[in-house]
Image (spheres, grey):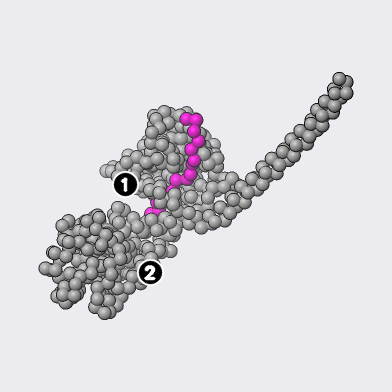
Amino acid sequence: MHQQQPALSVQQLSVNVTASLYSSMINPTVSSTPISAHNKRGRNDTSGLSDSNMQVRPQYHQPNLAFNSNNTPNKRIRGFNQQRNDGAYLGRYTQNQPAQLNRNSLGTRDTEKRNNNNQQQPSVATCRFATTRFPFSPFSVIFSQEVREKLVVDDLIKHALAHLNVELKTVAYRRGRAGKDECCILIFVENSESFSFLYDRSNWPTELAGCQFTTKNPSIPPQLALVLPTVSLQVDWDEFVQEVKSNYPGVENIVRLKNKTQQPVRVVKLKFLSPKVRGEILEAGEIGIMHMKYKVVEYFAQANVLICSNYFGIGHFRKNCPQKEESTCKTCGEKCSNLNEYQCSGLLKCIHCGWPHTSNDSKCKVMKDYRAALTRKLLANVVPATVGDTSSERTQLNNQLFSSTTSRLPYSTVDQAMPSNMNDLIGKKLDSMLAKVEEEFNATRRSIGELKDEMSIRYDETRKQGENNGKEI
């Protein structure tokens, strides 16, 4: 309803005002329907009007017009696609609000922009959810019979300490989904050292709680990954991978990232199994491969978005859900008093954007925008790498700020996000550079002075020797 169309003539307005307002009130979602191909403006049409619009649209009413208090069409100031993104997606973070038609507010661009900015801000509950989840994905231990979880974890910790002299640190364990006649236990570790230890299958005992078992390793988390942002696409990939693994044995895997169109980009991700090797490379800030030095930065995963399990709204827990009496079906988006008795139509419809997918789909446009805003807020609290930081401290910081997820964040988002204290860091860096330049200048000046003195002494000696030779002749 907030989308604006090009200005029309007075005759068209007199015909379409009543019909457009009535159609907007009985069909509030009509503005989210895409325009047909023959009604779209051309790429080179910069005037805001096209011949096809002027010829076709006068025959029908205009359901998408927005009017101000003077009942005159507002000026079109943005493209249709941009308005659709801002109005249909960013404006739906807070749900459960009835659609309203306010002639005085529809024409106010500043108010709409301010409301969208407020809705983009992640809530306190969302930030707490993203920073307090388990930072590492769990290890799955699968048995063919029922066992006690605590006994399994105790045996594993005792084996690591007694046979390998490693203090294995865990934060939680619980039952996981398993097949028929199977028992699956999920073990969550606390730090990168414990994750690397359990990732190696040779460190596990043959039996736990007196039973045979199998394990399933999770993906390597961002806490054990680094990024090379400037690796040329013309480099010999096989030779590049071989030299990295030979020079740095702690590297487990090397992956070249791809963009949204699945095309390879210059960004290369390094996955480590040795926190020590990763810390040394990160502290150095660069890595030498094939007689070239590449800049190394940290890899940050995107944060998990808090979704209500009752309403499937974004940014609040179930106990704080504003929809107490009813529940929402995640498939069709309809509300009902009892989901167990509700007969779902099976038609997919997201409550956030209206597109045909479930309401908790991570690929939802609204979910992506909210996740990007949440990630930017978390990145604002990141302390950049300095010489004084230790690997354990930085690992602990990353564990607190980011959750581990197998999906990766587009590196351009992370690369463009800057910490809040970046100005102070840049100032300190410039001061150190100026101090070095001044020191080099003073050293060069002293060298030039010494050279002048030496040349003056040699000139005097040569002149005296020439005078003596002249007297002898």
Q: Is residue 266 above or below residue 380?
A: above
- Taking the spot 31% from the left edge, 53% from the top edge, the residue there is 362
Cβ–Cβ under 8 Å for marks 2 and 1? no
Please, what is the three-letter code of the amino acid marked with disc 1?
Lys
Give the magenta part as a residue range: 290-304
How many numbered marks have been drawn onto this rendered protein structure?
A: 2
Q: Is residue 399 left or right of residue 345?
A: right
- For mark 1, what is the residue? 260
Q: Quadrant of the N terminus?
A: bottom left
> Residue 114, which numbered label?
2
Tell me the quarter of the image containing the C terminus.
top right
Residue pushed farthest right?
A: 472
Toward which corner of the image does residue 392 lie, by quadrant? top right
Bin the neighbour count of mark 1 within 10 Å (Cα to Cα): few under 14, some 14-19, many 20 and up: few
Q: Is 297 included in the stretch rendered in magenta?
A: yes
Instruction: Identify the disc placed on residue 90.
Output: none
Above or below 125: residue 361: above
Q: Could you tell me residue 415's position as x and y percent?
A: 44, 49
Residue 87 in sight from this viewpoint: yes
Q: Residue at x 53, y 50 (%)?
A: 384
Report helix, strand or loop for mark 2: helix
Image coordinates for residue 12, horizontal then vertical, percent: 16, 73
